[in-house]
Amino acid sequence: MNNRKNTNKRAVSILRYGLFCLATILISSCDSKNRVVASVDDHELTQLEAEVLMEHKGYDPTSKKDMKVFLQEWCDHEMYLAELEDTDPEKAQLVELRSRFFSGDLARYYVEENRLKGKLDTTVTNAQIEAYYETHKQAFELSDYLVRALYLKIPNGVNFKEENIHQTFLLKNDKDLAEINSYAKLYAENYYFSDSNWVLFNELAKDIPASKYNVDNIILNRSKTYFSDDEYTYFLNIIDFSLKDEAPPLEFLRNQIKEIIVMDRLQELKEKNETKMIQDIKDKHEITIHN
């Protein structure tokens, strides 16, 4: 009996300790979100506010580099606002009034989105995507090549010839890709390969000193080449390409076209429901214009 009581006491103690640890973690998490990460005079920005703004501006809140860039940007904006408040209060008031006025447009966007999202049909069939593509091909013409390719960037201190990489990157044998993948994980500064997805060449090769070489010849000849500069050796295997000034393959545009079709539907819904929506909102709020 005593053993059972002792066991129950230990179980209760463990449960209490677990709950205490969980509460500590939750409190700590809340505290970190409320932590001030930047300030200009008496204007403060918390971790949570920074993350919300970063997501809407296209930054990655989990990236230390992005956080550093964003915080500097936020501080610069607040600095100019503070300076204007000190040196020209009338203009500072104008800035505040204009901000409030134009923020109504953003508020309208979110109100419309919230009210209409339940009515919006987001299902887009392959047939609809293909029909849109055929009708709007000219609008999708690109000024850059699309390629399917392998790209590998290796520091010059690494002797790639010992591992026969200058032959393996040609992908002549079935086992070559697995070897390139393994090698890239160990030594590559940058690596890309997809034999099924298209990518813009300039995006793929943004850190290649391509201006030194005839890019047109490299792509049009489906080149399998490698070259070096003072720091790196670059391996490039062009498997396939799509010409510039032509519409890219449908697969490259499929998601983009789906978004366009859904946004067109949303715009139609807005136009059909605008009058009623505005009246509904007016009925909810006390609006007075003093003449």
Image (cartoon, rainbow, N blue to C red):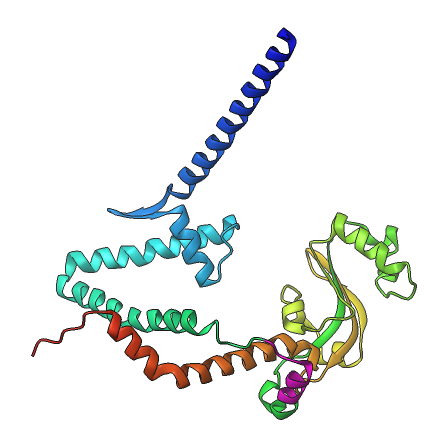
Q: Is residue 125 left or right of residue 223?
A: left
Q: Residue at 55% across / 24% down in the picture?
A: 15
Q: Which residues make up the magenta segment?
A: 123-133
Judge whether residue 214 can be spotted in this image: no
Pick out the residue farthest to the top: 2
- 225 is within the stretch colored magenta: no
Q: Is residue 43 above or below residue 138?
A: above
Where residue 278 sits, quadrant-wise, is bottom left
Answer with the quarter of the image where residue 179 lies: bottom right
Q: Position of residue 25 (x, y in %)?
A: 49, 34
Foreground residue among 199 and 253: 253
- Residue 124 in the figure: left or right of residue 105: right
- Tell me where residue 4 sits by quadrant: top right
Residue appearing at x 26%, y 59% in the figure: 80
**In this rendering, does residue 33 appear at all?**
yes
The question of residue 131 being in magenta is answered with yes
The answer to which of 221 and 258 lies nearer the viewer is: 258
For the N terminus, which image quadrant? top right
